[in-house]
Amino acid sequence: MKGANKIMVVGATSAIARSMIRSYASAKHALFLVGRDDSRLSVVARDARARGASEVSTLIMDIEDESAHARVVGTAVEALGGLDMVIVATGVMPIQATSGPDINNLRKTMSVNSVSVMIFVENVIEFIREKSPLTIVVFSSVAGERGRASNYVYGAGKAALDIFLQGLRGRLRGADIKVVTVKPALVHSPMTEECKKNALWVSADEVATDIAKCIDRGDVVIYTPRRWRFIMWVVRALPETLLHRLNI
Amino acid sequence: MTIHRKMYRAWGLIPRQAQRAIGLDWSDDAANCVCGATEKVLAFGNGRSYGDVCLNQSGMLIDTEGLDNVLEFNDVEGTILCEAGVRIADILKVVVPQAWILPVLPGTRYITVGGAIANDIHGKNHLSGGTFGCHVEEIILQRSDGELLKCSRRENKKWFEATVGGLGLTGLILAVRLRLKRITSMEMRVSTNTFVGFDEMLSLSDEKRRSVEYLVGWLDMCGGSASSIRGAILCADHGPGRNVSKPYSTPVINVPCASIYPLIRRSTVGFANRVQYMRMKLRKSSQIMDIYRFFFPLDRVVNWNGLYGRRGLAQFQFVVERASILGVMDIILLLLRRYRQVPTMGVLKVFGSIQSPGLISFPREGITVAIDMKVDANTEKCVVAMNQLVAEHGGAVYPAKDRFMTREQFEVFFPGIGDFKNFIDPGFQSDFQKRVMS
């Protein structure tokens, strides 16, 4: 990865984040890892250290805890001596029952995947205040592009996030802060364990390599695997009745 | 953690139906997974065993793909602590740039460390390096009764000896500490000598074995008799360069699935082997190769087993004393002819006297030959007959490659089985174990 070598990863125990952490560690970057689970976070940190990261620190934080955001960013900046990139890879995907979502699930999903991420990103921008160039990479999903019966609550959260990040890019035009939206498609991970899989599913490692390349290239909206940019263009064009009838 | 059904297959492309499995992504879930299971389990790594040592069709598999963290790498003393799902490929990516390497390397880098220990794999340097288990310092083993054992030559020694080569039956290997070997270069100095006739090959290997670190023979067995076997002996040592940072070589071809029309068949094998023999003959007698090309030549074709078609392949690997090998090979070729089997290729290695710590480890002093063949209606009869031949000559057959050995043959090959059975975890089983141990 060119340029940036002080990287904060929030949601560091997620599958794609772990793959990205590994390649940044092999490239000897300095890492600040944030997650909710202490023992798992420390395993990810040990792995990063063993693979060659120049510096690895960790901190426990739940993204829903807004009061912790500024402290976490401040600690990262202090630990790494600056910050070049922030990756936000948090997210939950509760299984949506066929009869409709559980209201508590709905509230939680929107809070964790959508509102908390938006607030965190704003808090990061506020803290950094254009002191130095920064790239903020946020994980959304192709699920946010259409409302599908099988996963519309998760999709709604991601859709809100997409628009927010797009607007943020508009607001930050001319500033030294770049906001990147990553839209993974079908990726094998503990989060998608219960989904029915087929030949279109890919590994977290493949996707992580793709994302790193696209970030280096300067892309601001990354579909991964890349063919999904075309697939989603088709899916977006489908009339709604056809979308629901196809049940994709 | 949920139970899912997925195609978990051995390298021989068995079974044809999905198996029940549970994904283990974090080692802190291991106790829950192993102790809370309602049926007997077996860890599944990367499915590079050829036969049913890695299968558990009447129980459940524990998919260890997610246990892939490297926990510690001491690049001063040369040790690495990693979870059991870490692959040889991943370890090399971490250690080679720091001028270390695993002391024993198998023919493919896509196996897990757990699988390497469970089968006590060997490489092309058994004479000086022994088996993989000889370089294992510590194994963390999760048992189904809740116990988490730290096993080494000093602590829980008997458990250590049962787990090395223990086919995953003593419990779930969670993490492993390995000792590494220093290298100065990613280059290997390789010499290639072709031969015609198995006895010429044996003289070549006798001549070369004491003066090189790595020795392997490639055999074209299409000729049908020991005197017509031809091939090449490759001898190699580390060095001479100083560069350890060359990029990792990537696969060239990916076979996406088992070919419907098997590309490996009687008509193509002979031709392919002739081409390979000519390529070996045309090689300079001494050349420099990078470590990936020397150790893992077949890794350039991902999923090459698909070329055998849906019925898959079987590999018969045996070891007998040096004194018996010529006679045994004569009869093996006779049996292959009698049962009309197509031996795609043979690989020969020399086993020395370094003892593995494993109770039922395969390598013992002698010559080992591994023969690949396409599976058809007669393969089982042929392999059982070959197993019998090896048993009569006091040798052994490698469980990691086997599908057909009988219980009686297994007990002859592995006299340590009586002692080993005391260490089998009652919560674990494998199709191989059900076939030959119960």
Image: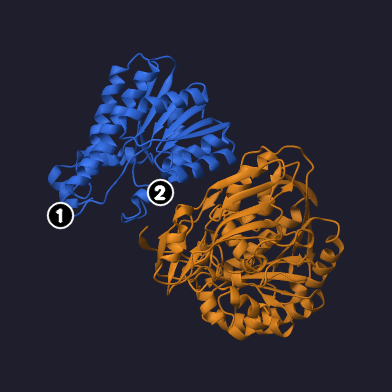
Chain colours: A blue, B orange
- Pick whichever of labels 2 and 1 is earlier in the sequence: 1
Number of other residues with Cα within 10 Å of mark 1, as a class: few under 14, some 14 to 19, many 20 or more: few
Q: Residue at x 66, y 61 (%)?
A: B155
Chain letter for mark 2: A
Amino acid type, callout 1: Ser
Label 1: chain letter: A
Amino acid type, label 2: Val
- Judge from the rendering whether residue A151 lies leftward or rightward of residue B305; answer left or right: left
Residue that badge 2 annotates: A202
Q: Residue at x 57, y 37 (%)?
A: A26
Location of the C terminus of chain B (image quadrant): bottom right
A187 lies above or below A214:
below
Residue drawn at (67%, 78%) of the image: B414
> Mark 2 near mark 1, Cβ–Cβ under 8 Å?
no
Label 2 crowd bin: few (<14), some (14–19), many (20+), radius 10 Å? some
Foreground mark, 2 or 1?
1
Location of residue B415 in the rendering, given as x and y in whole percent from the top left corner: 68, 80
Q: In the rendered view, does B425 fall on the left or right side of B409?
A: left
Q: From mark 2 to mark 1, how far is it between C-alphas?
A: 29 Å
Nearest the camera: B195 or B127?
B127
Determine which residue is flagged by label 1: A99
Dot 2 and dot 1 within a common chain: yes
Instruction: In this rendered view, identify the residue nearer to me: B262 or B151.
Output: B151
Q: Say which of B133 and B142 sits in front.
A: B142
Q: Which mark is residue A61?
A: none
x, y (%) of residue B326?
A: 78, 77
B370 over B278 or under it: above or below? below
Q: Is residue A217 above or below residue A18?
A: above
